[in-house]
Image: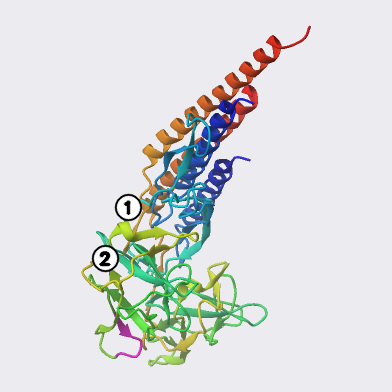
Amino acid sequence: MDRMLYISMSGAKEAMYAQANNANNLANANTDGFKQDFNQFRAQHMQGPGWQTRTYSMDERPATDFTPGAVKVTGRNMDVMTPAEGFMAINSPDGKEALTRTASMQVTPEGDLVDINGNPMLNEGGAPINLPPFKDINIGSDGTISVIPADATNNQFVAIDQLRLVKPDTKQLEKDESGFIRYTGDDNLEQGGVKVLSGALETSNVNTAEALVDMIEFSRKYEMQVKMMKTSKEHSQSSDKLLSLN
Amino acid sequence: MNRALYVAKTGLEAQDFRLAAISNNLANANTYGYKAGRAEFNDLLYQNVRQPGAQANQDESSTLPSGLQLGTGVKAIGVQKIHTQGNAMVTDNQLDVMIQGNGFFQVLDQDGNINYTRDGSFQVNQNGDLVTSAGHLVEPNINIPLNSTEVFIASDGTVSAKLPGDPTPAQLGQLQLATFINPAGLDSIGQNYYKESLASGTPNVKAPQTEEAGSLLQGALESSNVNTVEELIGMIEAQRTYEMNSKAIKAADGMMSYLNNNV
């Protein structure tokens, strides 16, 4: 069988993967704090004995785009985001630290400060944050959490803890299978140097116009590959005809 | 089957869910004591199609520098109630009470269980007991004598009534408020009522004006905290994202139909 068919099949298959990745970005166009994934194709030469005439295509997700999304003001003072470079730390279910740029924080019945999925927010020492019962809460621009305790007689804010704020090099960040952003460097990230905005959330950074254009491009690419598959089929048909006995 | 088709489907479902949350907020834009809900989303798991660092071919030095992980879409994780204070609507009705603070009124349902509400449009039943507009008894029970000419509800919850021929108002009782450490975790059961849940924590009952419970304001009601402008913007956003995801479905469908028709 002509290898042309396999080459174009690989092209079509990988275009379909790319389309799925693009659809995932689009599906999360409204997910707060979502970071869109890049997509790229790579030429993968056939190795081994024989002529090196064939090159398969391979789709990959080289990285995630960590550019900030738009600021969405919500007015709820437990919604926080880091407006520029920098991340807040949360504890993911596997016990490791994950990073996020926005969190709609909640307080559990035990007073633990968690994100919307129940993952504990971490303080400057990397430990979960616990709050006493409070009348009001305020998150300072340096991540300081202060509350008016429920039993306070005068309405004065008392600083309780500080969010863990880090500024890793985005080249050393990756998104894991659960969608958590992880730091892959060896050293411990240092606290501080990051501003926090309270009363706002960061929207997803998906560029929808680009995603729509990519979607068309992937569709057309796919059609071209299918056309090549068809051409290959016609080739085999005509050679079959030439060699037929009657 | 085409993955993109299913991924885009999750996008459609999420926006559909968001629109439902928005329309519920808009429908309750004039409901006293209603708290707006905000739809929250998460990205779903990522599938490893090719593991980064895997062998690219027989040559051992050749490994993939980056693999292919495909996201599987989006999921709605819930509607978060936003418990910010609504505006005061002055009604001048002497049995309308508004809470300025974090507390909730306690109300007994027909089975004697306690529900919580911030809707303080109270009335009196045939026995003179203070009830909600749905007819449920307020806890602790306050009985207002039939011949009282005026009822006063102080900011600390003390209810007193003026009786004919008596210049000093008679004290009838004190309203209590319940607070929760995580009011967003309360179970909404409709009719402006909430129920305690595992997420909300146990209620902390106290008199108004103590700790974080808040004070009471007679002759006013708390309007819903729905911001209609925000909801309309959310509606546009949900609709457009829905359209984009349906385009992705169309594209995926187009790819499959092209394949079917040409090979």
Q: Residue at 51% x, 25% y: name it.
A: A224
- Is B199 placed left or right of B208 in the picture? right
Determine the secondary structure under disc 1: loop
Distance Cα–Cα, label 1 vs label 2:
17 Å
Is B60 placed above or below A187 here?
above
Q: Position of residue B57 (x, y in %)?
A: 51, 46
The chain ID associated with circle 2 is A
Query: Which labelled disc corresponds to residue A69?
Result: 1
Q: In front: mark 1 or mark 2?
A: 2
Amino acid type, callout 2 = Lys
Residue located beneath label 2 in the image:
A167
Q: Residue at 66% x, 14% y: name it.
A: A239
Q: Residue furthest right?
A: A246
Q: Nearer the viewer, residue A131 or A76?
A: A131
Q: Position of residue B113 (x, y in %)?
A: 62, 81
Question: Which numbered disc flags the more N-terminal residue, 1 or 2?
Answer: 1
Determine the secondary structure under disc 2: loop
Amino acid type, callout 1 = Gly
Q: Position of residue B119 (x, y in %)?
A: 48, 71
Q: Check the picture and name the quadrant holding the N terminus of chain A.
A: top right
Residue A12 belongs to the span the image colors magenta? no
Magenta residue span = A146-152
